[in-house]
Image: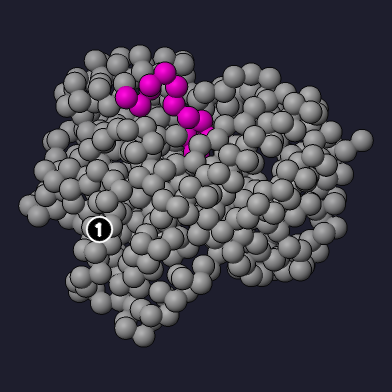
């Protein structure tokens, strides 16, 4: 019988060099990695190099990459057009700390896809949400932010709350407790973070009524893409938009993950909603560190009056030039449509195979992304996902796929991504491997 233990043993047998790297790296880096989210049991695979939709580890194993750097690589690894753009700017200067018109051109490109009057660039999604929150507090003169349990918005102190809290500390369904997710964050911050569940508009109404006149903004991942892959139901996002308008509360769509992956114009286009602010990162740089925040003129104009935003590397010409090429030449409607079609084929193929093998569960999929839910229950928010996703089955699925050369994030809370450089052959391989390991998931 296939057990998690036997799958782990196979993983260890295939990756002796990774194990060595891990043991040595631990001498220099906590957990042997440079981000807690890169660690997993028994030890992480250490990569050697990557190209297109594939990568090779230090043991020489080849993988088809469906994680795509936690969804940051819609153009795959080291796309030749982006390498060219990088070379072009390398010899023209990589950091000016002075304006270059390239930055304005990049903002103009973003405005073709998103409802943005004005834009500012920064380096990471973390910075984009942090600056947005400062901005809305200044704009509204209020401090409280409503966030969704299970949504992730980066590593800064304001937003490191109720991302993956233990079920024992989360409070009742209708009034979740705000849980600080890391030691080192001042405890008073959580008093300004109000948490509600995704897909629960009544809870949001209650919070708005209880805290009338105190709430600056609602920040939301339009699709929960840091909690597996959970889409909105029953026009939830439209209701959120209506409610925020009624109460004069700023709506921030955190499109760090949904951007460039759900539709040409991200979740704003896909769900036909105009938030007040949008944050972008990941596929904006497509492998190079770039982020942006933007939206309504009257909010962004506070940066001309009394709100500070800056940063040495923010909007540097190197990443901006790459992003400009990426937006104009790679993240086109045609290319994205091709990736969406492949994702459709993958989702349909998996659905058929689940039926064929009598596996309980379902597939969620939109645009270029999807996720398998191994569960007998309906899942529509953080709590149902945490309670009802069969974690043992997920581990069997994950080790089974990875031991057969299909790379997926080692966590239930991450979806997969089909980039514009994935091929039919890559999708067939995913389905073939799933067909092979499916009997272990019944
Ligand atoms: C929705 C969302 N917002 C913000 C962030 C933070 O982005 P970064 O890792 O670039 O700081 C992430 C990262 O995964 C994210 O998924």
Query: Looking at the picture, how far across and down is residue 40, in whole percent?
Result: 66, 49
Query: Looking at the picture, how far across and down is residue 347, in whole percent?
Result: 62, 37
Taking the view exactly as shown, the residue that stands out farthest to the front is 334
Q: Nearer the viewer, residue 430 or 124?
A: 430
Q: Which residues are magenta?
A: 224-238
Q: Is residue 12 left or right of residue 195?
A: right
Residue 434 within the magenta-colored segment of the rendering:
no
Element at label 1: helix
Taking the view exactly as shown, the residue that stands out farthest to the left is 305
Query: Looking at the picture, how far across and down is residue 145, in whole percent?
Result: 28, 33
Which of the image's four quarters has the N terminus?
Answer: top right
The residue depicted at 42 percent of the width and 75 percent of the height is 86
Taking the view exactly as shown, the residue that stands out farthest to the right is 1
The residue depicted at 77 percent of the width and 67 percent of the height is 59
Please tell me in which quadrant of the rendered image residue 136 appears.
top left
Query: Looking at the picture, how far across and down is residue 225, in whole percent?
Result: 49, 39
Please tell me in which quadrant of the rendered image residue 190 appears.
top left
Q: Is residue 272 left or right of residue 421?
A: left
Mark 1 is surrounded, within 10 Å at the Cα level, by few (under 14), some (14 to 19) or many (20 or more) other residues, namely many
């Amino acid at each position: 019988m296939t057990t998690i233990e036997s799958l782990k043993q196979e993983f260890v047998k295939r990756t002796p060099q990774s194990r060595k790297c891990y043991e040595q790296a631990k001498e220099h880096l906590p957990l042997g990695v440079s981000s807690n989210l890169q660690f997993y049991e028994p030890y992480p695979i250490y990569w050697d190099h990557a190209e297109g939709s594939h990568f090779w580890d230090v043991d020489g194993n080849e993988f088809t990459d469906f994680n795509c750097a936690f969804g940051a690589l819609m153009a795959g690894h080291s796309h030749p057009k982006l390498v060219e753009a990088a070379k072009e700017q390398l010899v023209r200067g990589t950091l000016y700390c002075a304006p270059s018109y390239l930055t304005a051109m990049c903002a103009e490109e973003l405005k073709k896809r998103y409802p943005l009057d004005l834009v500012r660039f920064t380096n990471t999604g973390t910075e984009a949400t942090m600056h947005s929150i400062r901005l809305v507090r200044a704009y509204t003169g209020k401090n409280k932010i409503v966030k969704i349990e299970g949504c992730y918005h980066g590593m800064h102190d304001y937003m490191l709350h109720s991302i993956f809290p233990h079920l024992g500390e989360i409070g009742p369904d209708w009034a979740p407790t705000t849980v600080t997710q890391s030691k080192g964050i001042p405890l008073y911050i959580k008093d300004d973070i109000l948490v509600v569940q995704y897909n629960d508009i009544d809870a949001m109404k209650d919070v708005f009524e209880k805290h009338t006149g105190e709430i600056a903004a609602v920040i939301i991942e339009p699709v929960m893409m840091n909690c597996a892959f959970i889409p909105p139901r029953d026009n939830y996002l439209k209701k959120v938009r209506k409610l925020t308008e009624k109460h004069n509360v700023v709506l921030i769509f955190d499109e760090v993950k949904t951007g460039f992956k759900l539709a040409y114009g991200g979740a704003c286009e896909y769900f036909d909603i105009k938030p007040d602010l949008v944050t972008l990162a990941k596929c904006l740089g497509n492998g190079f560190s770039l982020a942006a925040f933007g939206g309504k003129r009257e909010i962004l104009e506070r940066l001309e009056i009394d709100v500070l935003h800056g940063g040495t590397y923010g909007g540097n010409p190197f990443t901006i030039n790459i992003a400009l090429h990426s937006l104009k030449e790679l993240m086109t409607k045609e290319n994205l449509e091709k990736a969406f079609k492949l994702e459709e084929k993958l989702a349909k193929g998996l659905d058929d195979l689940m039926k064929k093998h009598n596996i309980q569960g379902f597939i969620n999929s939109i645009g270029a992304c999807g996720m398998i839910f191994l569960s007998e229950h309906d899942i529509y928010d953080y709590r149902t996902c945490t309670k009802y996703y069969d974690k043992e089955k997920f581990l069997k699925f994950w080790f089974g796929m990875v031991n057969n050369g299909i790379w997926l994030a080692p966590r239930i809370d991450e979806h997969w991504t089909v980039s514009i450089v994935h091929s039919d052959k890559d999708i067939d391989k995913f389905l073939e491997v799933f067909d092979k390991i499916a009997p272990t998931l019944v």
